[in-house]
Image: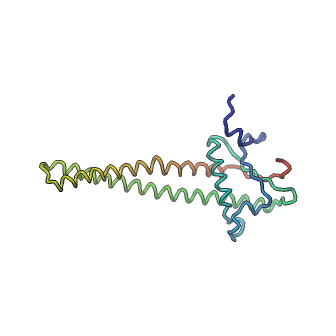
Amino acid sequence: MKKHEYQNLYNRNPDTNHMMIEVSLEDYSEIFNGWDASPIRRKDLEPELIDYLEQSGTEIPLNESVEICFYLPQDKKDLEKEQKSIVAIKNNFRVVVFFINKRLKRGYRQMATFIVMSLIFITSAYIIRGQEPLPLLTSIMREGLFIGGWVFLWEAFNLFFFTTHEERKKRKIFYRYLDSDIIFKDMKDV
């Protein structure tokens, strides 16, 4: 059986068979943005942690189950902080998904607008084309309508296949994190 490259980068939990995204911490506060004065359940995650999780999510195939494992020193373990941290982390994932969905909806609206504009431009160009012979200015306008129509159609194509594709992939990653386990272990278990 061939071992994939991501299996060299991430450990597999022998009990659950999930890929583990492991993070070492000195304290629970390292999970959250130090500038955020909100209560723990509403705190933003540290931007570097979000980036790391997003990168890990792209490296581990979406068909693999994952769990996020935080390692802390034995003397820092606090079950209440762990529970509050888990709630806060899941809330952050929900917020990330909410904003991704918002960007996707905006992208879909733009796509629909571009397609409608493309159809209007190209249809207008074909209508003008049927009126022969055309004066120079009308001929230039017709060509401009054709070009504009195809540009609008390309923009819709670009949004769907390139821009929103990345957002949809990112959303899948964070949906997977919402379904994953978040565990805290002693640093000595590393």
Residue 102 image offset from top left, x and y in percent = 51, 59
Q: Is residue 61 above or below residue 85?
A: above
As rendered, which of 136 and 148 lies closer to the eye? Answer: 136
Marker count (numbered):
0
| Quarter-of-image position of residue 50 | bottom right
Q: Residue at x 71, y 62 (%)?
A: 32
Residue 89 image offset from top left, x and y in percent = 69, 58
Q: Residue at x 18, y 56 (%)?
A: 137
Q: Residue at x 72, y 60 (%)?
A: 31
Image side of residue 128 versus residue 29, left or right: left
Image side of residue 134 versus residue 53, left or right: left
Residue 43 image offset from top left, x and y in percent = 68, 65
Q: Is residue 17 above or below residue 114?
A: above
Residue closest to the far right = 75
Image side of residue 117 versus residue 65, left or right: left
Quarter of the picture containing the N terminus is: top right
Residue 74 image offset from top left, x and y in percent = 87, 56
Q: Residue at x 64, y 47 (%)?
A: 57
| Colour scheme of the picture | rainbow
Image side of residue 10 versus residue 114, left or right: right
Residue closest to the far top = 1
As rendered, which of 52 and 106 lies closer to the eye? Answer: 52
